[in-house]
Image: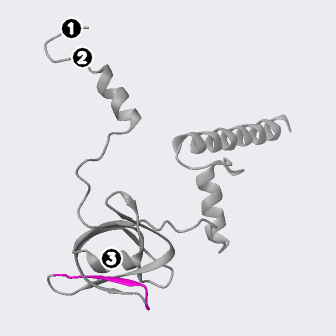
Amino acid sequence: MNRNILTTLGLALAFSVGALAQGSSNPAAPPPGGTGSKAEAKAETKAEGKAETRPARNAGYPFRGKLKAVDLTAKTLTLAGREKDRVFHVTAETKFTKDGKPATLADGAKVEEVAGYARTGKDGRAEAVTVRLGPAPKDVKPTDEAEARASTVPPAGRAR
């Protein structure tokens, strides 16, 4: 009888040591209870079919070129292109400047060069965010921050 008990205890000990060795030999495997990490939570969410609710990033892009047409009725600017023209739609949020001062879409009919920043709208069309009418102003004053940086730079050849 003692022999049966010792054999049973020996087998139980061998199985438990084997199970511990199995777990430590694969450190990449997560423990059965889970780690609670963000990556694991995302994987579980996707596995359940739930999409994360995060707004899509709508990155914009700069544009510049020769103004071909201004349509005040449709509120569009058309820039001449090499292969095809580009049309930018104007919204209520579009900011216009001309010679560094606020302007309107109607002021665009009198200029040749335009530049600005646009993004793709929800309906897939290009929407102008900012539009500069005419050439870039040449006498732009530096900001106070730029002046402060310039005043702290020592002249060349002199040590502080």
Residue 154 image label: 2
Residue 86 image label: none
Looking at numbered disc 3 in the image, what kind of residue is underneath it?
A: Gly
Looking at numbered disc 1 in the image, what kind of residue is underneath it?
A: Ala
Q: Position of residue 77 (x, y in %)?
A: 34, 81
Above or below — where is 97 with respect to 144?
Answer: below
Residue 108 image label: 3
Q: Residues within 10 Å of mark 1 (few under 14, many from 20)?
A: few
> For the residue labelled by badge 1, is the local secondary structure a helix, a strand or a loop?
loop
Q: Which residue is mark 1?
A: 159
Marked residue nearer the N-terminal end (1 or 3) = 3
- Report the residue at 65% width, 75% height from top: 49
Above or below — where is 155 with respect to 119?
Answer: above
- Report the residue at 61% width, 49% height from top: 30
Residue 71: image quadrant is bottom left
What is the distance, in whole Å, between disc 1 and disc 2 at their CAs? 7 Å
> For the residue labelled by badge 3, is the local secondary structure a helix, a strand or a loop?
helix
- Report the residue at 66% width, 47% height from top: 35
- In this view, the residue in front, 137 or 74, is 137
Which residue ends up furthest to the top in the rendered image?
Answer: 160
Q: Position of residue 100 (x, y in %)?
A: 35, 57
Marked residue nearer the N-terminal end (2 or 3) = 3
The answer to whether the residue labelled 1 contacts the one labelled 2, judged by CB atoms less than 8 Å apart, is yes
